Image: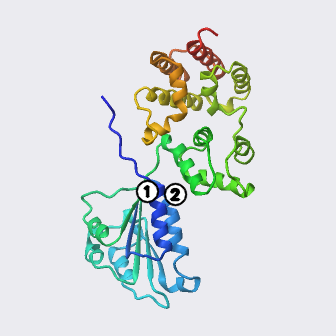
Amino acid sequence: MAKATKEKIDTLGEFNRLMAVLKSKQFKNVYLLEGDEPYYIDLLLDYFDHQILDADQKDFNLITLYGKDSEWSDVVNACSRFPMFADHTIVILREAAQLRQMDLMIPYLENPSATSMLVIDYRGKDTNSKDKWLKPIKEKGIVFKSHRLTEEDIPGWIQQYAAMQQFKVETEQAEVLAGYLGNDLQKITNELQKVQINEPNLSVLSPEMVERYIGISREYNYMEFPKVIFSNDKVRMSRMLTYFVANPKSAPLPALMATFYTFADRIYRCYSVPDDYNNPESRSLYYYRAYAKQFQLTTVHKFIALLNEFALKTVGINIANKSDSELLKELVGKLNALLHPQG
């Protein structure tokens, strides 16, 4: 049975559209920022906090409240204040998910003050149809959903972010960055900005730059190991395996197993997802299709079965006192023999 897929939301695109509207000073009176990805919410809050009011206007017109320490009436009273020497009063409600009796704010939300901006930081949660106070916000204001990306979405996000910063990241480098940095968007942008600072004329992010400024070794990066094995690059495979055995912390076996699983899973999906560049899911598999063409589906099945066998061994099941280094050498030997039986 085909697995149902959740509709993907272009959060980065939505964020940039909202920022463009804010910078054009087309303000609404209520903003709801919800979801489990803090990166965009923090950027928007920073804009409301620092970019709309002048420094000498903030003392009288910027009010920050916290849901766990406030009543709904405190929020309404703050929003009802008339601005002093400014066009707007900005009220930022942080930790809004902890505010009690949100429904009692509905009368205000239905008729918000024309001179106030209420910014509701509802991070960590999503609203639903049971939240009656949501309806007037949708009618009168802006709802911004900031959802955390899945691991498979991160490479595409890196490329999209880089394009908006006027430089290019090739698919292979995006995969390496995603595997090394994870799905912490703030961490990713910090590292890319580090490269931009050191390379003011940056047009294409090269492997040399990734190694020099972000610290991801091209020669001994365990994220590259599955590709080396599938490609039957025996010289590099031997060199990397020797290094990993001598330096176990450079390629922890659980992390390496997860990398193999991810690589195999994406190759496996190539057999069922049509090759259509206009389809985002298909586009995310572009890098893996060359490998899928080289191997039978049954071989990939056996590859995954072998990983399952060794996943049990890494936690002490079906194993007779073997070290991680011994397991790694055995795993690599069997994977290579499976993929390249002719040597």
Q: Residue at x 65, y 18 (%)?
A: 329
Look at 62% across and 33% down and name the residue there: 223
Q: Residues within 10 Å of mark 1 (few under 14, many from 20)?
A: many
When asked about the image quadrant of residue 241, the answer is top right
- Residue 104, compared with residue 286, is above or below; it is below
Element under label 1?
Answer: loop
Quadrant of the image occupied by residue 197: bottom right
Q: CA distance from mark 1 to mark 2?
A: 8 Å
Q: Return the residue nearer the eye: 284 or 82.
A: 284
**Residue identified by numbered label 1:** 146
Q: Are marks 1 and 2 in contact (CB under 8 Å)?
A: yes
Q: Residues within 10 Å of mark 2 (few under 14, many from 20)?
A: some
Q: Please tell me the numbered disc located at residue 286.
A: none
x and y percent of residue 56 in the render?
A: 57, 86
What residue is drawn where x is 55% and y is 74%? 50
Which mark is on residue 39? 2
Q: Residue furthest bottom?
A: 85
Report the amino acid beneath label 2: Tyr
Q: Is residue 321 above or below residue 44?
A: above
Quarter of the image with the N terminus in it: top left
Position above or below: 260 against 218: above
- Asked whether residue 224 is in view, the answer is yes
294 left or right, relative to 138: right
Left or right: where does residue 142 sit relative to residue 302? left
Residue 296: x %, y % from top left: 48, 17
Q: Nearer the viewer, residue 146 or 107?
A: 146
Q: How far from the left and from the top, in percent, is residue 167?
A: 63, 52
What amino acid is labelled 1 in the image? Ser
Which residue in the rendered view is the most extreme toward the top? 342
Compared with 272, 194 (above or below) is below
